[in-house]
């Protein structure tokens, strides 16, 4: 449909690709089942599903192929090799998709398919920050995989009380923007440089930070990544614009010039010699920690995966205005009932594991971005 609307019969060059209008998250939502390919080559099967809110609070579902997962595995190994992480290291991972605490004899796929790895620890990101640190101290990781906001909370404690993870050799960040201030704080308190990774549920690994220059190398074997200005023109080196991603491997979901909702700055040629295009920095996807009345802080998983079981939510945002008060803004095509509002409240309270007083605000139009040009799905306004 997009090809027909653009007057393009096919895409066989970058020039023709750039004549295609970007695909927004809202458009991807509205397409429903028609967004997905009716047939997928047998060698790309089996399919998997992924659902993400990204930085915009607009849930998007995609179907993933076996070939896409193969590229994800290759990039995961590439990331480890670039940064010189020995596979024998003890690894701790603090992620949103870990539902309960776990320890394992190896890192899991794909590393264990190729190497003999060290032991691994998995910590749910909803665990209280101090409890996370207690578990890390007991396990003694040499490699830590963590979200930047979570790491910032660690850094504040380490600055006040001292750094006590003496075996730690690598800190890999995922899922959020890493600001220079956090890099400086972590370096000062731990002596370690942050090793970052830019990825999304929809497109997988988008760029890996170069260990030599700090630039982000785009994974161009599988993706075409464009950075465009307000007029849709390609940004030049040093300019910042919206990130458009075209996935060359996903034959189940046509993510072509997909507006992922992030902003990035175009980088120069990297002196490391790898030859891949670069981004100097990524400005998107920044979230806050939720604060609980007992003084603890943790990651604000809000249960968005279940929203559509009670109401057709197009976009959402949560704003914490007090220790026990949260405003839930939802964008829907039509008014939802008091019963549906109550259902959304129950989902959020269960996900946050606290009976917050939640007020639902209904909206019909897309929620505005913040003063910094970004949209945060969770905003904590408590000083």
Image (spheres, grey):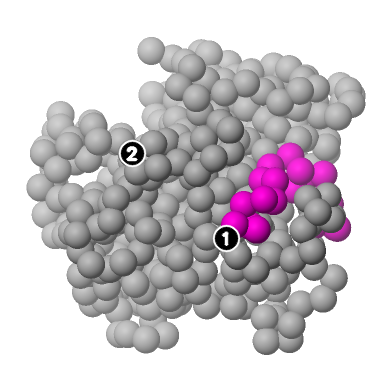
Say if residue 42 shows up in the picture: yes
Give the residue number, with chain letter if any, for mark 1.
14
Query: Split into 4 quadrants, where in the image is the C terminus?
Result: top left
Residue located beneath label 2 in the image: 238
* Near-viewer residue (270 or 252): 270
Q: Which residues are magenta?
A: 15-35
- Is residue 248 found inside the magenta-colored segment of the image? no
Image-based side of 134 in relation to 276, left or right: left
The quadrant the N terminus occupies is: bottom right
Count neighbours of disc 1 (C-alpha within 10 A) and say few if under 14, some if 14 to 19, many if 20 or more: few
Q: With 313 as the anchor, is 165 left or right in this view?
A: left
Asked where in the image residue 120 lies, by quadrant, the reply is: bottom left
Q: Residues within 10 Å of mark 2 (few under 14, many from 20)?
A: few
Position in image of residue 157 (x %, y %) = 22, 33
What secondary structure is marked by label 2?
Answer: loop
Name the residue rendered at 67%, 81% in the picture.
Answer: 44
**Which residue is at the front of the view, 318 or 356?**
318
Q: Is residue 127 visible?
A: no
């Amino acid at each position: 449909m997009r090809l027909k609307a653009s007057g393009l019969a096919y895409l066989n060059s970058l020039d023709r690709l750039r004549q295609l209008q970007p695909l927004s998250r809202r458009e991807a939502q509205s397409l429903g089942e028609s967004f997905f390919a009716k047939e997928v080559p047998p060698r790309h099967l089996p399919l998997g599903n992924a659902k993400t809110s990204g930085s915009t609070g607009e849930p998007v579902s995609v179907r993933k192929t076996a070939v896409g997962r193969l590229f994800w595995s290759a990039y995961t190994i590439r990331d480890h090799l670039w940064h010189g992480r020995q596979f024998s290291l003890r690894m701790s991972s603090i992620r949103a998709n870990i539902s309960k605490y776990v320890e394992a004899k190896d890192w899991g796929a794909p590393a264990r398919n190729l190497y003999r790895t060290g032991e691994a620890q998995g910590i749910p990101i909803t665990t209280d920050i101090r409890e996370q640190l207690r578990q890390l101290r007991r396990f003694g990781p040499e490699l830590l995989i963590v979200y930047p906001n979570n790491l910032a909370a660690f850094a504040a404690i380490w600055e006040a009380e001292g750094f006590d993870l003496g075996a730690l050799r690598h800190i890999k960040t995922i899922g959020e923007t890493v600001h220079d201030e956090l890099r400086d704080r972590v370096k000062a308190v731990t002596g370690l440089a942050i090793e970052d990774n830019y990825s999304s549920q929809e497109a997988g690994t988008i760029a890996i930070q170069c260990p030599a220059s700090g630039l982000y190398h785009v994974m161009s074997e599988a993706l075409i990544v464009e950075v465009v200005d307000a007029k849709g023109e390609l940004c030049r080196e040093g300019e910042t614009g919206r990130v458009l991603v075209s996935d060359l491997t996903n034959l189940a979901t046509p993510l072509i010039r997909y507006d992922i909702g992030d902003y990035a700055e175009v980088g120069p040629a990297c002196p490391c010699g790898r030859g891949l295009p670069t981004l100097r920095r990524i400005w998107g996807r920044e979230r806050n920690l939720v604060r609980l009345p007992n003084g603890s802080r943790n990651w604000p998983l809000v249960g968005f995966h279940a929203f559509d079981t009670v109401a057709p939510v197009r976009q959402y945002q949560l704003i914490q205005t007090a220790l026990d008060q949260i405003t839930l803004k939802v964008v829907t095509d039509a008014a939802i009932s008091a019963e549906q509002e109550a259902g959304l409240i129950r989902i959020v309270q269960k996900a946050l594991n606290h009976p917050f007083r939640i007020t639902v605000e209904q909206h019909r139009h897309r929620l505005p971005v913040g003063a910094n040009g970004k949209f945060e799905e969770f905003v904590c306004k408590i000083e």
